């Protein structure tokens, strides 16, 4: 029988440690990104340098070592844990005789693979073209140097200019389409505000378990996988709290260390869903070694989006993987849950209740038939949990805000 399944690309991961960030942790994350893209990280190598080599990224000796490993280990792909210039990619490919990509290209590839909604696909394409444009320019410069003067510019240069113009036109079209999508998103947001819909956004580092928590709370059926960037498109689902109040729960794209600036800008509208929410859940994988760093990355992003006045619930997920006796002291004030087992979910729901933007009252009423219009008011402005017609009036269980409660409290029983 012929085997149709292709083996995944075998990848060699390469990093240059200049001391400007935690290179080891970043390299570990790169391995997870490679797995998410469908390749197999075979080996990792790191070189300490005061600065990256402008022409080859790594030193010449290390480049020869990379070439030898690629031959010996049957490597298909070299992935650099930084953004490379066209010259660096070309020189590394010539030396190693395999395809070379950088961290940004890898993340863009995962984004393209995961995006499902029209907006997600538009944002990915725009980010890819922004990344490609200066690299086309670089190749154009190289081609212009092939000749020695007037009349020596060949069709290669013309092709680059055509490609560049085409990319700019396409980027403008994408921006216009995204502006329309954003207009529609704002219209929905205004409608939610007008209808008094309370929103709660789940934000956090990628692979923290946001989609699993969404599924646990709402049975949303959101893709939940142990992969980075499993969710790219914001998903909204209704969640009924124990008091009977219904809120809108929003799942957002995960964050990642050293996210390329093209992607932060491209996915800003998705993250702004969190900025516009009434409550934010900052979800973190408590079982990870860098839980504190991940929480801080999210806090910094929320600050940059202007979320200072929004209640933020710090929620530690995957606590079923931890021994409670060794839980760090500074985690003591956080809400500890396991989205997978359901442990701690009641405490989370109570915390959401406690941070609702308006005080809600759960009431048991007997509304006289002469005042039956109040039941319609509850349907419109509150949450009608049950109603029963009795000989003395309408028996009602409801949830109401302060304004509606002022009209109802005379009929409490």
Image: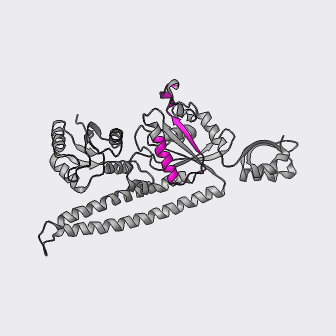
The image position of residue 22, as x and y in percent, is 36, 41
Does residue 307 lie above or below 6 as drawn? below
Front residue of 253/262: it is 262
Does residue 109 lie above or below 174 as drawn? above
Front residue of 58/268: it is 58
The way the protein has been coloured in the rendering is one colour
Occupied quadrant, residue 165 = bottom left
Residue 307 on the magenta span: yes
Q: Dividing the image into 4 quarters, which one contains the N terminus? A: top left
Which residue, as the protein is rendered here, is positioned at the far left? 148
Residue drawn at x 36%, y 39% as measured from the top left:
25
The image position of residue 179, as x and y in percent, is 47, 64
Residue 253 on the magenta span: no
Does residue 218 lie above or below 115 as drawn? above
Front residue of 302/154: it is 302
Which residue, as the protein is rendered here, is positioned at the far bottom? 150
The image position of residue 335, as x and y in percent, is 57, 35
Would residue 390 be visible to someone looking at this image? Answer: yes
Residue drawn at x 46%, y 37% as measured from the top left:
291
Would residue 337 be visible to someone looking at this image? Answer: no
In the image, which residues are magenta? 294-323
Q: Dividing the image into 4 quarters, which one contains the C terminus? A: top right
């Amino acid at each position: 029988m012929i085997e149709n399944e292709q083996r995944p690309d075998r990848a060699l991961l390469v990093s240059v440690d200049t001391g400007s960030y935690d290179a080891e942790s970043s390299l570990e994350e790169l391995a997870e990104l490679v797995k998410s893209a469908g390749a197999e990280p075979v080996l990792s190598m790191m070189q300490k340098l005061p600065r990256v080599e402008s022409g080859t990224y790594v030193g010449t000796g290390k480049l020869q070592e990379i070439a030898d490993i690629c031959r010996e280990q049957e490597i298909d792909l070299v992935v650099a844990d930084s953004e490379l210039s066209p010259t660096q990619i070309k020189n590394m490919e010539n030396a190693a005789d395999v395809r070379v990509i950088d961290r940004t290209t890898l993340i863009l590839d995962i984004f393209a693979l995961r995006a499902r909604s029209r907006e997600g696909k538009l944002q990915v394409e725009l980010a890819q073209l922004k990344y490609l444009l200066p690299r086309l320019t670089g190749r154009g410069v190289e081609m212009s140097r092939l000749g020695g003067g007037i009349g020596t510019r060949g069709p290669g240069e013309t092709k680059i200019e055509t490609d560049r113009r085409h990319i700019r036109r396409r980027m403008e079209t994408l921006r216009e389409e995204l502006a329309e999508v954003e207009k529609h998103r704002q219209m929905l947001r205004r409608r939610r505000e007008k209808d008094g819909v309370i929103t709660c956004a789940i934000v956090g580092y990628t692979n923290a378990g946001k989609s699993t928590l969404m599924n646990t709370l709402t049975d949303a059926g959101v893709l939940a996988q142990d992969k980075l960037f499993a969710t790219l498109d914001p998903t909204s689902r209704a969640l009924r709290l124990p008091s009977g109040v219904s809120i809108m729960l929003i799942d957002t794209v995960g964050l990642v260390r050293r996210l390329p600036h093209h992607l932060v800008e491209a996915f800003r509208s998705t993250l702004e869903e969190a900025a516009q929410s009434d409550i934010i859940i900052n979800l973190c994988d408590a079982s990870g070694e860098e839980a504190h760093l991940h929480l801080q990355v999210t806090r910094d992003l929320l600050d940059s989006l202007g979320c200072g006045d929004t209640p933020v619930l710090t929620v530690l997920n995957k606590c079923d993987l931890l021994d409670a006796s060794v839980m760090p002291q500074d985690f003591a004030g956080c809400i500890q849950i396991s989205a997978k087992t359901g442990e701690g979910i009641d405490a989370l729901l109570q915390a959401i209740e406690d941070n609702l933007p308006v005080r809600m009252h759960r009431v048991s009423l007997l509304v006289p038939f002469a005042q039956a219009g109040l039941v319609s008011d509850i349907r419109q402005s509150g949450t009608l949990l049950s109603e029963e017609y009795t000989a003395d009036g309408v028996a009602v269980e409801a949830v109401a805000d302060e304004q509606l409660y002022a009209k109802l409290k005379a009929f409490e029983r």
